């Protein structure tokens, strides 16, 4: 009932803060661009490793990772903002004023989503200018960006849960590190089949691997592991929604 | 009671080290994060060793050079942030009222950074040896690696100190970190320069001094005694150290005059 107006107000304020403060927006834009340049530019020879076999080339291969990484870190950076709101006392006043407090979490999630959409629009433009080949059609690309959207939502819910439990900016590494590990313990540089040893074992059970492989299938126009990827992303989102809502209750209890 | 210059440096180096050790995040993060990246990269890029012309069959051995440089970057941030905090809290102003020489503060601070750099280097080496890496240059090479670590830590520590002294702000020091990160990644960090396919990236990596720092450490680990790589690596590290120390010295004098 009162959830949407609260969500809209929180999202508007967060987005206003982000887009009028370069020190908040630029890192979330520059990091994915930088990783794209460093990986797609510096490692393109890796596609010549026997068995690599990705028809759209290394730029498209790395673009999918950068898309998911920007989605995840867009969520984490929004989590930093939530922690800052708690540290400054703003979030306490927000909790007192909001008739529906779940709307506060929804608002932060909406802001993270809009922030990521702006970032990925720019990153996609840069990738296309750099000559990225896209094999998938409109439906495939919709699938790819929807996966990114689900990852963004899951990441912001994770970060919000941490921010509302610890309520300090010092919680930044706690938000970042698990997301970093989940992303990098997936087949970042080569397909899963070319990984060996312990990293292959970890990547095989890592749900991010399903999302990454499906994303690469979409951009190549050869969808693969679609059900597993959407299932993993949705399951992560649902579990982390519970995590964030319990965090909200903890913040309410802390007063 | 007046302390001799050496004692002043020792006291401040001890303070710098103890302060770092009392902040677990400042010890754990520079140790763990480079090792995590080593694990991720060496696992993910192991198949790159099958590229024709790759200099070793072990990507762990190839990538082990990176934590040395990355650890130094983290140490830089810690050193700069601590010094900036001394400025922000007024410690530097109070110190300026004592007979302590300003240069002792810089030497002491950097002494702590170098000590941490050596601890980090020993940990990285131990992890590499446990992972099965054989140091091609042998025991003397290990000593050369530690010597290189001292020069690199001193240089990067002085850079962090310079930014802290110029700006007096911990946030400004932290703000420089992404710039160092760019230098690290636009280098021969993941592939030898001759195997980088994109011309523009290879040109940037060739112009980037961090490539030569990494290649110096890498040569000692995977190819033995390579005079050119060592001369370039030690030369660039020493140049950075001398220039950064000179800049930090000037910035310190100007900061003390203002206080």
Image (tube, coloured by chain):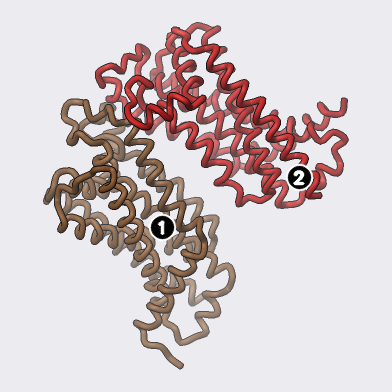
Q: Residue at x 51, y 55 (%)?
A: B25
Colour of the chain lettered A: red
Contact flag, marks 1 and 2 (Cβ < 8 Å): no
Chain of the residue where label 2 is placed in the rendered structure: A
What is the number of the mark on residue B103?
none
Task: Give above or below for A134 relative to A251.
Answer: above
Q: Position of residue B118 (x, y in %)?
A: 32, 61
Q: Which chain is brown?
A: B
Q: Residue sitting at 82 percent across and 42 percent down?
A: A95
- Residue under the point 51% across and 20% down: A211
Q: Which mark is residue A251?
A: 2
Residue at disc 2, secondary structure? helix
The quadrant in which residue A198 appears is top left
Q: Chain of mark 1?
A: B
Q: Relative to the observer, which residue lies in front, A221 or A230?
A: A230
* SS at badge 1: helix
Labels 1 and 2 in the same subunit: no
Residue B132: % across, % down: 24, 43
Query: Is residue A43 shown left or right of residue A248?
Result: left
The x, y position of residue A91, in whole percent, is 76, 45
**Residue B43 figure quarter:** top left
- Of the pair A198 and A76, the residue shown nearer to us: A198
**In the picture provided, is A248 more to the left or to the right than A224?**
right
Residue in front for this viewpoint, B16 or A130: B16
**For the residue carrying disc 2, how many other residues have a C-alpha within 10 Å: few (<14), some (14-19), or many (20+)?**
many
The answer to whether B213 appears left or right of A73 in the picture is left
Label 1 belongs to which residue? B75
The CA distance from mark 1 to mark 2 is: 35 Å
Q: Position of residue B221 (x, y in %)?
A: 20, 47
């Amino acid at each position: 009932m009162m959830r949407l107006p609260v969500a809209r107000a929180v999202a508007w304020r967060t987005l206003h803060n982000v887009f009028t403060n370069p020190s908040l927006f630029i890192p979330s834009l520059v990091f994915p661009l930088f990783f794209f340049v460093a990986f797609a530019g510096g490692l393109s020879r890796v596609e010549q490793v026997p068995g690599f076999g990705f028809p759209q080339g290394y730029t498209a291969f790395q673009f999918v990772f950068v898309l998911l990484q920007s989605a995840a870190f867009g969520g984490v950076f929004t989590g930093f903002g939530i922690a800052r709101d708690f540290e400054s006392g703003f979030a306490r006043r927000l909790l007192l004023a909001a008739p529906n407090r779940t709307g506060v979490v929804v608002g932060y999630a909406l802001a993270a989503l809009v922030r990521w959409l702006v970032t990925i629009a720019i990153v996609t433009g840069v990738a296309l200018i750099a000559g990225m080949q896209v094999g998938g059609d409109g439906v495939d690309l919709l699938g790819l960006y929807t996966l990114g959207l689900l990852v963004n939502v899951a990441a912001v819910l994770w970060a919000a849960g941490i921010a509302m439990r610890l309520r300090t900016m010092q919680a930044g590494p706690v938000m970042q590190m698990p997301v970093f590990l989940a992303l990098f313990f997936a087949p970042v540089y080569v397909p899963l089949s070319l990984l060996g040893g312990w990293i292959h074992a970890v990547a095989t059970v890592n749900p991010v691997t399903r999302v990454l492989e499906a994303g690469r299938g979409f951009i190549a126009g050869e969808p693969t592991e679609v059900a597993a990827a959407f299932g993993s992303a949705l399951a992560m989102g649902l579990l982390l929604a519970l995590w964030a809502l319990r965090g909200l209750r903890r913040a309410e209890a802390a007063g | 009671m007046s302390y001799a210059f050496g004692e002043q440096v020792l006291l401040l180096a001890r303070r710098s080290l103890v302060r770092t050790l009392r902040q677990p995040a400042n010890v754990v993060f520079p140790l763990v994060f480079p090792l995590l990246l080593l694990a991720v990269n060496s696992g993910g890029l192991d198949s790159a060793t099958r590229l024709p012309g790759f200099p070793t069959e072990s990507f762990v051995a190839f990538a082990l050079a990176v934590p040395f440089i990355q650890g130094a970057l983290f140490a830089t941030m810690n050193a700069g942030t601590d010094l900036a905090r001394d400025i922000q809290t007024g410690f530097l102003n109070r110190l300026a009222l004592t007979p302590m020489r300003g240069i002792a503060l810089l030497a002491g601070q950097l002494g702590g950074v170098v000590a941490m750099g050596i601890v980090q280097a020993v940990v990285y080496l131990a992890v590499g040896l446990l992972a099965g890496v054989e140091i091609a240059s042998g025991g003397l090479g290990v000593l050369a690696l530690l010597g290189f670590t001292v020069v690199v830590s001193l240089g990067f520590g002085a850079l962090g100190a310079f930014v802290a002294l110029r700006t007096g702000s911990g946030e400004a020091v932290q703000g420089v970190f992404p710039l160092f990160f760019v230098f690290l990644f636009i280098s021969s960090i993941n592939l030898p320069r001759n195997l980088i396919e994109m011309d523009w990236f290879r040109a940037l990596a060739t112009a980037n001094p961090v490539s030569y720092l990494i290649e110096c450490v890498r040569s000692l680990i995977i190819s033995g005694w390579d005079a050119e790589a060592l001369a370039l690596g030690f030369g660039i590290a020493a140049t950075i150290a001398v220039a950064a120390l000179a800049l930090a010295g000037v910035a310190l004098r100007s900061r003390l005059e203002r206080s």
